């Protein structure tokens, strides 16, 4: 697959250095087709490669338990930076940096940014190496550029699907945000976390566009879900089973708050939260998702009952207000 750096030489060196004999490869969906080619390289290095065929959406889903059960002595996790600390199985992260140039997309964003001077710049891990170039183009166009660093992410300016702490840390200083990267997913997260005008510079399509109308559509749906959940008598509280999604303390807190407000609440442990999962519990009126918040936000139309994030549950239960949640952002971090 062209367009990404899979760091094959580093992988071979790590296998030799660690003397690894059995290696588990974990790739996100878009990169899985590279699995057999990478497995071949590992085989030639003298180790047995096993490709994880399970879905992998983020670094939260590091396959430690699977590696242990397969007797694996090295995990190679592609496409994400380190998120979960663990010591059970040595793990290397291959971030699969994109090689696509970004200058044309950044230039395309300049007319859209004409009414703003202070611009916050952010990107996903795939395009971090382009941030300096993007900053220079914006500065040449007369902009003041800030790249946030909350200390929570692996790199300044980095956002992930559920962590927008870098942009939140500078939101008060910025007039608008520019996200460098493809698609709507991360840029929507920025708009929903900061309530600031947010634009995408998409290097794949070589174009730039605003995202706030899409964010408003999501907010309308979230408001409807919260209203429906206010009338719920019985809540299901999901606890994620993926290593970076397991937040039992927060689930217990949600359960206690629901009970304080006279509701019944049951803990439900799950690796995946799907529309089918909900169909098995017809007596439950609404759900709180303490696992991956993007399941609530991006797939809400597919669920037959409201599936709230923790912050949304705070609004539905009366512990917080809609305005307060918008100020703090829909994501906890
Ligand atoms: S919790 Fe969801 S958004 Fe966050 S890293 Fe995992 S899959 Fe991505």
Image: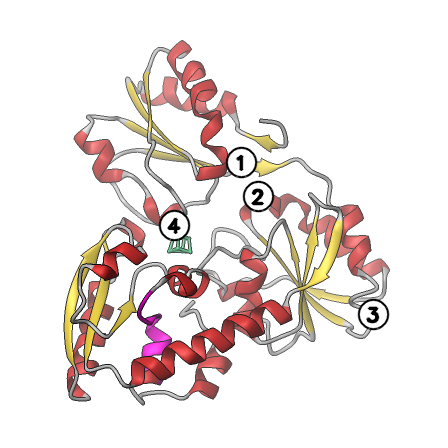
Q: Which residue corresponds to the image point at 45% horizontal and 73% vertical from the top-left? A: 330
Which label number is shown at residue 83?
Answer: 4
Asked if the residue under mark 1 is in contact with the one under mark 2, i.e. CB atoms within 8 Å, the reply is: yes
Q: Residue at x 43, y 25 (%)?
A: 35
Residue 279 or residue 230, whichever sits in front? 279
Query: Can residue 305 be found in the magenta stretch?
Result: yes
Residue 88 shows in this picture = no
Element assignment for label 2? helix
Q: Quadrant of the C terminus?
A: bottom left
How many angstroms separate mark 1 from mark 4 (CA)?
A: 16 Å
Distance from the alpha carbon under mark 2 to that under mark 1: 6 Å
How far apart are labels 3 and 4 at the CA level?
Answer: 36 Å
Q: Secondary structure at mark 4?
A: loop
Residue of label 1: 96
Residue corresponding to mark 3: 114
Give coordinates of residue 185: x percent, y percent: 54, 56
Residue linked to disc 2 = 126
| Quadrant of picture, ligand 1 | bottom left
Residue 64 placement: quadrant: top left
Which element carries disc 1, helix, strand or loop? loop
Question: Magenta stretch?
Answer: 304-315
Q: Is label 4's Cβ within 8 Å of ligand 1?
A: yes
Mark 4 or mark 2: which is in front?
2
């Amino acid at each position: 697959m062209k367009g990404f750096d899979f760091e094959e030489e580093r992988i071979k060196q790590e296998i030799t250095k660690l003397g690894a004999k059995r290696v588990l490869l974990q790739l996100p969906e878009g990169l899985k087709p590279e699995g057999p080619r990478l497995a071949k390289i590992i085989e030639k290095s003298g180790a047995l490669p096993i490709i994880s065929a399970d879905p992998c959406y983020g670094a939260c889903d590091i396959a430690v338990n699977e590696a242990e059960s397969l007797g694996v002595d090295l995990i190679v996790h592609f496409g994400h930076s380190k998120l979960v600390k663990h010591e059970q199985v040595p793990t290397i992260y291959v971030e699969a940096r994109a090689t696509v140039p970004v200058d044309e997309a950044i230039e395309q964003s300049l007319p859209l940014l004409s009414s703003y001077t202070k611009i916050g710049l952010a990107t996903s891990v795939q395009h971090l190496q382009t941030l300096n170039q993007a900053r220079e183009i914006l500065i040449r166009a007369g902009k003041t550029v800030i790249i946030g660093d909350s200390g929570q992410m692996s790199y300044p300016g980095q956002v992930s699907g559920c962590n927008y702490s870098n942009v939140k840390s500078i939101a008060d200083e910025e007039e608008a945000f520019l996200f460098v990267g493809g698609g709507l997913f991360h840029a929507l997260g920025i708009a929903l976390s900061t309530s600031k005008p947010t634009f995408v510079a998409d290097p794949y399509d070589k174009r730039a566009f605003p995202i706030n109308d899409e964010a408003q559509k999501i907010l309308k749906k979230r408001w409807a879900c919260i209203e429906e959940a206010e009338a719920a008598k019985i809540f299901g509280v999901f606890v994620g089973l993926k290593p970076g999604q397991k937040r039992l303390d927060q689930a217990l807190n949600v359960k206690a708050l629901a009970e304080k407000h006279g509701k019944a609440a049951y803990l439900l442990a799950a690796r995946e939260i799907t529309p089918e999962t909900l169909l098995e519990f017809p007596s439950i009126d609404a759900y709180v998702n303490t696992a991956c918040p993007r399941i609530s936000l991006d797939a809400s139309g597919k669920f037959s009952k409201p599936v709230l994030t923790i912050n949304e549950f705070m609004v539905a239960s009366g512990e917080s207000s809609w305005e307060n949640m918008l100020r703090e952002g829909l994501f906890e971090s």
